[in-house]
């Protein structure tokens, strides 16, 4: 009977089983997909998109207008124009009253003539005062407007003289009434010129 060289043949079974288990475990773990880790501050399922609902401000703002300072000299000049405007209106009222009194014969010829002569004197004085009241130096815009004011006052003076001439030297009332219309027109032009000058002055 031949002798078994390995008296304990079962001792190799356990290592073979262990080797088999290790190989099986290796094959199993490599077949599983590795899931990457997701940082705490990110989401792996979806990406959130935030939409801003705040509309940009596109409206235009109107620049504020800085008021222009009016010098005391300009203020004094404009105050003088206002006084002149009142004086011109007073002359106009006196002219209308004198002619109305003559037309309805509530005044005599002598009284009407004297009233018109006084009006001419007062209108000449008025026109001279207007011409002398020049605007402050350096105010080119006011200087141009002042020329219109002076022209209207001069026209009133000429019209007043023509009213008297129409009474004294013309038959009928046509020439006198035409001159009266011119006088009233000069009053309107004077008031308009004063308003224009005040606008240029910023008042």
Image (cartoon, rainbow, N blue to C red):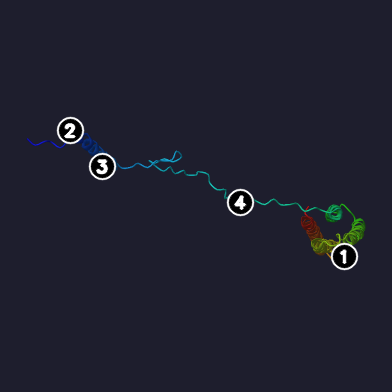
* Residue 179, visible in the rendered structure: no
Report the residue at 37% width, 42% height from top: 36
In the rendered structure, are the residues bearing label 4 and label 2 in contact, judged by CB atoms less than 8 Å apart?
no
In the rendered structure, are the residues bearing label 1 and label 4 in contact, judged by CB atoms less than 8 Å apart?
no
Q: Which residue is mark 4?
A: 60
- Element assignment for label 2: loop
Select label 4 or label 2 by which is in front. Answer: 2
- Element assignment for label 1: helix
Residue 27, which numbered label? 3
Residue 51, which numbered label? none
Residue 8, which numbered label? 2
Report the residue at 87% width, 65% height from top: 165
Q: CA distance from mark 4 to mark 2?
A: 102 Å
Give how far across and how far down residue 49 sits, in percent.
44, 44
N-terminal of the two: label 4 or label 2? 2
Residue 165, which numbered label? 1
- Element assignment for label 4: loop
Select label 3 or label 1 by which is in front. Answer: 3
């Amino acid at each position: 009977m031949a002798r078994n060289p390995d008296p304990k043949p079962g001792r190799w079974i356990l290592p073979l089983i262990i080797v088999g288990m290790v190989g099986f475990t290796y094959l199993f773990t490599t077949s599983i997909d590795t899931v990457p880790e997701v940082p705490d501050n990110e989401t792996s399922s979806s990406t959130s998109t935030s939409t801003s609902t705040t509309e940009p401000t596109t409206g235009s703002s109107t620049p504020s207008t800085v008021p222009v300072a009016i010098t005391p000299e300009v203020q004094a000049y404009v105050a003088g124009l206002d006084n002149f405007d009142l004086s011109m209106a007073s002359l106009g009222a006196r002219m209308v009253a004198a002619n109305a009194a003559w037309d309805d014969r509530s005044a005599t010829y002598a009284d009407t003539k004297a009233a018109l002569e006084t009006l001419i004197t007062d209108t000449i004085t008025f026109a001279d005062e207007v011409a002398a009241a020049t605007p402050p130096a350096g105010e080119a815009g006011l200087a141009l407007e002042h020329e219109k004011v002076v022209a209207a006052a001069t026209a009133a003076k000429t019209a007043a003289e023509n009213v008297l001439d129409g009474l004294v030297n013309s038959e009928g009332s046509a020439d006198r009434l035409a001159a009266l219309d011119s006088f009233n027109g000069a009053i309107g032009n004077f008031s308009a010129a004063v308003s224009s000058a005040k606008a240029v002055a910023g008042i």
